[in-house]
Image: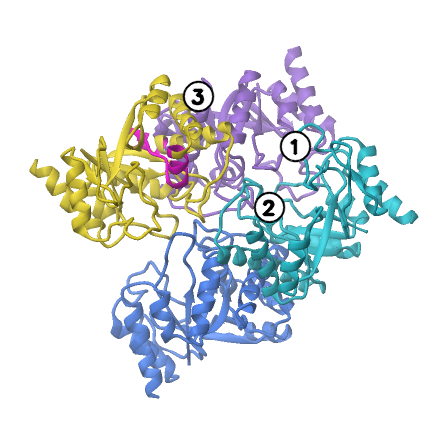
Chain colours: A cyan, B blue, C yellow, D purple
């Protein structure tokens, strides 16, 4: 089980997250590519930091909306969306390349991630973009109760998948995350986060928001780098992994 | 002698230049990369158009200043400037790659081009950025009376150079272009443009603004794709080249 | 019957529309405010041009999406949308003020206009923003078969309304515009445009896309400043108005 | 003696400064206007916070360079610079107006402030922009050994001035600030900051970086809202002021 975390989401003079503190404890860094956050300098520094800690680098492309942090739904044509993804991944590839490293996977950000998970057409477009890169890199998507369609589409384009689960969000019985605005949707205590992470690591079902059991098959757990519990939870989860 | 032209400088809903009309007559398209102009969709369409006409593609990175079209001088640290160039070239490389083509050279835009030609430190930084790309692609710079230092620096970094001359701008005796605001600096008649192009093609000296002779050794002539004379001049110069 | 037209939609180095040609023939200029198009310099020049031709100035605020020209639907909270409108109108007010003129109405742009016309909550927010400006200026909205709810909401906030109709778009029987992508939705011949304008001017019903009659009560006709027919149609419609 | 502080320099998802903590202790808030930092929502919230603490609001316009936080020198024509200032101040005026408050002064930001203080032409342009606003509001500039020319130019345009001094920066004997990169230029201990503030409050000379005495006549002390000492120093200086 790998730990992935969004990284490099600072921009110009603005700092976001605690990249330097979190990086030593994760396996995979989803590095923002300049459209929803980051800039060339931040990208370069984040790649260097990931490399220093032997963290695998993923491209984290988003919608072109800095003010909205790529969290607003935006409509693009298939062709536009493909080019938006190619542009961002290519930019990060060049920055990786000069540091003798590579982009090893793609995980879309924010509203693009949500659109990909809620709309198979958008998902297909994202898969298509990655296949066009011809870089033999997988796409990271959300582990759900049923990812069969996702698997079939990726397979048809020759693209691998990584499945991520969340340790600090409540799941609903249908396998989706409980909407963020509902009470209890985001865990605010270390214990709940670590408990859910432990279940995922041990390949045990997680408890949904109504207390039922939900089985998810995940390759990686998404860690959030921001917030009061970020550092303590990633350290605790890393300890569990080390103790295995 | 190759003809190069800035291409793909539209942005979102705004169109600039007559790319479709000019593309058939040029050899090398300097394609904007999204910082001073262009966006992923425009880049993709411009690459397709260049490919259709067997035009060699160059990256045309600029300063991050859309409103100022990359024409304002801006100070960046060496590291920042390298990352700004890498980002843009990488983005274009990815967009080229999915169309089975490549970025074959780099020509900086506007104020970055001027800074590179007027400041050897900036020039060295640009050369360094290209060498880091490890793509074995040359840098296009301005042919001057004396490019020895440029050649030495490029050589020391293992980078090739392309030298461009201008057919629609008056040169001064020192080999620099006459400042744009001075009367006569920009040729506004087809005859002057074609005459200067002819001299360059035939490797003959051009007449400076005071009537003296200036010898320039150029691999390529820069064509401007905008303006009333753009199409007629590129057609006329192409005719000369064909008749050789 | 007044003629209104979107103006000042150039940005930095990019020109859009034929403002100088169209301005002499219109009564009301909807001036872009920098979020979907325009910049402070373009705004200032457009205000000057409007003033020169005694054209009434309206603010034309849009969503903050330059690349998408404010044509993409974007979700904002009520408070965010109000502030987005206030910001843009205030900026134009200052630029008008130094030229001894004023913003006399507000007409939202693109996706914001569409959202306002298709969603009463968004409409109410726009009305609220204008009422907060306390500038005693009306909102321009689309004349429909039934604007009763719009009128009631505006009245409750003490805001006046201007109703605009389109002369170059086909209406459907329900009073909405035929979607742009459908054949025949946008008139491409001068005669259709002028005929519909004439009906509107004479307060006669217009013919819908199925040939039925639709009565619209409009204070102003929206002219498009772009496209081959822009100049000839505005001239023809102005002639009709002059002959009355 | 008033305390002024740059406020509202967050942007979209990115937070800068500790506005909520600092605001209760200052007299004047220089509120960013969206070009180097801030957005309509941040501006509105910052105005509300200033109002809540009876803090006078100033417009803090900057160059249009978000990534560089308005700290890069950029060249604009006189007309462009005027429009850039008008746009930003007007936007803030509208946001103030709906909260029944007003913009009471203008203090340029970053590179624009530096350009204004180092170049009388730029200064004259800024003064001109404010006079055009016709809002009878003063310009805040840096108190120097000799502000005579500044005073004369402002007077000729009918514009008032506010003079600010710095309590956390070392002055040189010529009255300019010691360049930020030199050791000792920025005070990093509370005692130095408070001592200098005390001298300024008591209208006593401050000690320059070489230990000589420099007399400055200031109306206001600039407080920095960022950094470890921000809160403790503003609290200490407020205590001094209260004890007078």
Tag 2 secondary structure: helix
Q: Is residue A152 above or below residue C6?
A: below
**Residue furthest to the right:** A243
Q: Nearer the viewer, mark 1 or mark 3?
A: 3
Give the residue drawn at x 43%, y 30%: C122
Q: Nearer the viewer, residue A58 or C10?
A: A58
Q: CA distance from mark 1 to mark 2?
A: 41 Å
Tag 1 secondary structure: loop
Give the residue drawn at x 15%, y 40%: C198
The image position of residue A212, as x and y in percent, is 77, 35
Q: Which mark is residue A118?
A: 2
Q: Which mark is residue D98?
A: 3
Over which residues does the magenta segment extend? Answer: C94-117
Is residue B110 visible in the rendered image? The answer is no
Classed neighbour count for the residue bearing mark 1: other residues with Cα under 10 Å, few (<14), some (14–19), many (≥20):
some
Marks 1 and 2 on same chain: no
Q: CA distance from mark 2 to mark 3?
A: 40 Å
Horizontal side of residue C131 vs B88, given as left or right: left
Horizontal side of residue A9 vs D89, given as left or right: right
Residue D103 counted in the magenta span? no
Classed neighbour count for the residue bearing mark 3: other residues with Cα under 10 Å, few (<14), some (14–19), many (≥20):
some
The image position of residue B166, as x and y in percent, is 38, 71
The residue beneath circle 1 is: D226
Decide: marks 1, 3 in contact (CB < 8 A)? no
């Amino acid at each position: 089980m790998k730990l992935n975390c969004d990284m490099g989401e600072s921009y110009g003079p603005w700092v976001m997250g605690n990249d330097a503190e979190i990086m030593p404890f994760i396996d995979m860094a989803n590095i923002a590519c300049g459209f929803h956050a980051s800039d060339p300098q931040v990208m370069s520094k984040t790649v260097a930091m990931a490399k220093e800690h032997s963290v695998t680098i993923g491209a984290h492309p988003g919608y072109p909306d800095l003010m909205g942090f790529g969290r607003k739904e935006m409509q693009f044509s298939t062709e536009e969306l493909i080019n938006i993804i190619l542009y961002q991944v290519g930019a990060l590839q060049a920055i990786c390349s000069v540091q003798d490293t590579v982009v090893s996977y793609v995980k879309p950000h924010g509203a693009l991630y949500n659109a990909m998970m809620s709309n198979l057409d958008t998902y297909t477009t994202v898969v298509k973009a990655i296949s066009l890169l011809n870089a033999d890199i997988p796409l990271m998507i959300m582990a759900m109760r049923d990812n069969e369609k996702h698997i079939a589409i990726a397979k048809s384009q020759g693209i691998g998948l990584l499945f991520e689960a969340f340790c600090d969000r409540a799941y609903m019985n249908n396998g989706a995350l409980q909407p963020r605005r509902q009470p209890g949707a985001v865990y605010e205590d270390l214990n709940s986060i670590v408990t859910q992470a432990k279940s995922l690591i041990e390949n045990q079902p997680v408890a949904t928001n109504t207390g039922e059991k939900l089985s998810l098959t995940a390759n990686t757990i998404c860690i959030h780098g921001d917030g009061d519990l970020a550092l303590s939870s990633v350290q605790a989860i890393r300890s569990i992994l080390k103790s295995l």
